[in-house]
Every structure is written in structure tokens, then in C-alpha cells.
Image (spheres, rainbow, N blue to C red):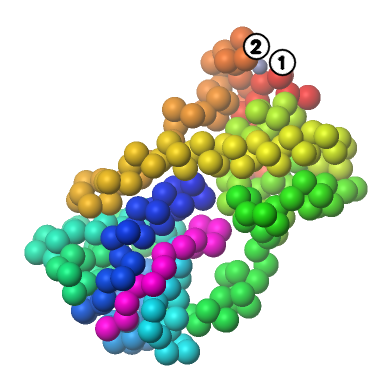
């Protein structure tokens, strides 16, 4: 499943290919992904001009220049296997391609999704904040409002393990399992430690490190941006960055002790006994 850095890279990759371009027509090969596509999606999008491509949590937000109150933003979640490509309109339809948005400039935004867990809605800008997908979400980890004081406040008196707290989207969005593991390693915190017992100094470090690991991953993924115009291109995980994730029984780069793995809330937790306490 794409994590926040992958979605951010997709967003940055698509933006220059779409912004300012007008939609000529929309072909729908399959009208139900995880949920049915919005009624009249093709008709609603026809003639709109892309104004901005942005991201909230792991949702891509395609905002349009000229829009009715109802159809200001196309919200798209990639689910497990969703991929976007921008190709020439003459390109043959992919296997598992479900939606193709043809642009006036001769290119097409193609959405393919093998497992069809992606989902889509058309919303007004105002409706986003109160929509059920967004209303409960915490701050973006890379934005100003994810402050040290905020993280300290979220951890106060909490007995839940710090790793589970980081992965709770009500607290902060987009810190998935991989990045929670990496951030806790880089800040030297035992993933199983109760959130409320981590010192304020260490939480301050943790907040900085969360941004660091996400930004590093986005930077590592930046080199895949050109793949959006190739049929076989797809953004992967930025694996060469990982210092603990997926490294069970391999030596820690910092202290040489073997990386351990345990299952915590149903997810693999990788950590170093030498470096994290
Ligand atoms: Zn270590």
C-alpha cells in the first residue's frame, strides 16, 4: 500500500503534467472500485481545467479551475495497488485500467488498479473538511501545526505504546508502519514504551525525526517522478533508506547488535536493543 511519501511523490509527479490542462473526455471501463464511482463522473469532469494537484493524508486532491459548487475537487485514494500514468491518448488500454481521463493536449491520465481497492469522490472544497474521510484526521506531519507541543499534549498520560500512537491518524496522519519504525529508531525510543512515559526532550527529537524520515523518503522517490510518463513505471518503496524496517537479524548500522522483530498491534516492529530504550 502506498504510504504518505509515495503519495506525495505521485502528487508532485502528476502536478506539472496536469495543471492548466483541460479535460476533453473521460472513459470509464469499470464503474466500481472499492465503492461505486460517483454518478455522472465522466459528465461532471468534462471541460474542467486542472488547477492544483495536492494531497491530504494519503488522498490525492485534484482541484479544478472552473467548477460548479458540487464538483470542485476530485478526491482519489489509491487503495492497495492504484497507479496513475500520464500517456499519449493513442496508448492501448492497460490491463486493469479502469478510468482514463483524456486531456485536450493529446495526453491521458490513466488509472489502473489490480485489486480495485482505490476509491474516488467528487466534492466541493468546503465539503472536504467535514467529509467522513477527512473529519477525524490529525495534522499533516510535514506542516506547521504538527508542533512539539502538540505531540507532547497527545502523549500526556497515555499508556498506549508510542509506536501505536504515532500510527493513529487522529494524532497525526501518514506515519505508517515503516516510517514509525524508522523514526523511533532514529530517535532512540523503544517502540513499546508507553507514550506518556517518553520525556519531552525525546518527543521533541521524535517530532523532528518523523519529518526527517518522511522528507528523506520523498527525496529518494523524487528520482522516480519521470516514471509517470512511462507505461511500466511505478513508484516503489524507498527501501535503501531503511535502517531497521525489514532488517531482522541483520546488524544495526549504529551499534552492531542484531535488529529484532516483534509483532505489535498486528504489525511488525523492528528495533535495536542497543540503540532504543
Ligand atoms: Zn543499534
Q: Which mark is residue 183?
A: none
Residue 190 position within the rendered picture, expressed as x and y whole percent measured from the top left? 75, 29
Image point (63%, 22%), residue name: 260
Image point (24%, 69%), residue name: 100
Of all residues, the one furthest to the front in this rendering is 20
Specify whether residue 48 is painted magenta.
yes
Residue bearing mark 2: 255
Determine whether the beta carbon of the residue marked 1 sits less than 8 angstroms from the nearest atom of ligand 1.
Answer: yes
Observer able to see residue 95? yes
Q: Is 66 drawn above or below residue 80 in the view shown?
A: below
Residue bearing mark 1: 274
SS assignment at label 1: loop
Viewer-nearest residue: 66 or 46? 66
Specify the segment rendered in magenta. Answer: 47-59
Image point (66%, 28%), residue name: 185
Q: Would residue 201 appear left or right of 210 to someone viewing this image?
A: right
Determine whether the beta carbon of the residue marked 2 sits less than 8 angstroms from the nearest atom of ligand 1.
Answer: yes
Amino acid at each position: 500500500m502506498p504510504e504518505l511519501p509515495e503519495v506525495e511523490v505521485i502528487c508532485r509527479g502528476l502536478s506539472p503534467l496536469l495543471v492548466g490542462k483541460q479535460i476533453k473526455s473521460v472513459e470509464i471501463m469499470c464503474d466500481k472500485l472499492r465503492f461505486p464511482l460517483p454518478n455522472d463522473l465522466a459528465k461532471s469532469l468534462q471541460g474542467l481545467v486542472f488547477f492544483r494537484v495536492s494531497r491530504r493524508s494519503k488522498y490525492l486532491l485534484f482541484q479544478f479551475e472552473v467548477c460548479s459548487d458540487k464538483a470542485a475537487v476530485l478526491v482519489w485514494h489509491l487503495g492497495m495497488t492504484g497507479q496513475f500514468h500520464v500517456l499519449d491518448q493513442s496508448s492501448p488500454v492497460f490491463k486493469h485500467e479502469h478510468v482514463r481521463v483524456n486531456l485536450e493536449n493529446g495526453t491521458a491520465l490513466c488509472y489502473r488498479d489490480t485489486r480495485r481497492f482505490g476509491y474516488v469522490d467528487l466534492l466541493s472544497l468546503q465539503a472536504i473538511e467535514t467529509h467522513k474521510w477527512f473529519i477525524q484526521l490529525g495534522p499533516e506531519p510535514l506542516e506547521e501545526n504538527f508542533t512539539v507541543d502538540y505531540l507532547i499534549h497527545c502523549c500526556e498520560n497515555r499508556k498506549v505504546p508510542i509506536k501505536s500512537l504515532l500510527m493513529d491518524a487522529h494524532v497525526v496522519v501518514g506515519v505508517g508502519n515503516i516510517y514509525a519504525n524508522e523514526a523511533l529508531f532514529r530517535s532512540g525510543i523503544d517502540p513499546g514504551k508507553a507514550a506518556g512515559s517518553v520525556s519531552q526532550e525525546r518527543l521533541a527529537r521524535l517530532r523532528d525525526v518523523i519529518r526527517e524520515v518522511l522528507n528523506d523518503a520523498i527525496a529518494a522517490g523524487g528520482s522516480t517522478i519521470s516514471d509517470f510518463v512511462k507505461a511500466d513505471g511505478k513508484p516503489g518503496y524507498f527501501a535503501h533508506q531503511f535502517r531497521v524496517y525489514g532488517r531482522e537479524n541483520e546488524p544495526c548500522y549504529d551499534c552492531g547488535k542484531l535488529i529484532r522483530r516483534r509483532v505489535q498491534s498486528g504489525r511488525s516492529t523492528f528495533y535495536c536493543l542497543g540503540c532504543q530504550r
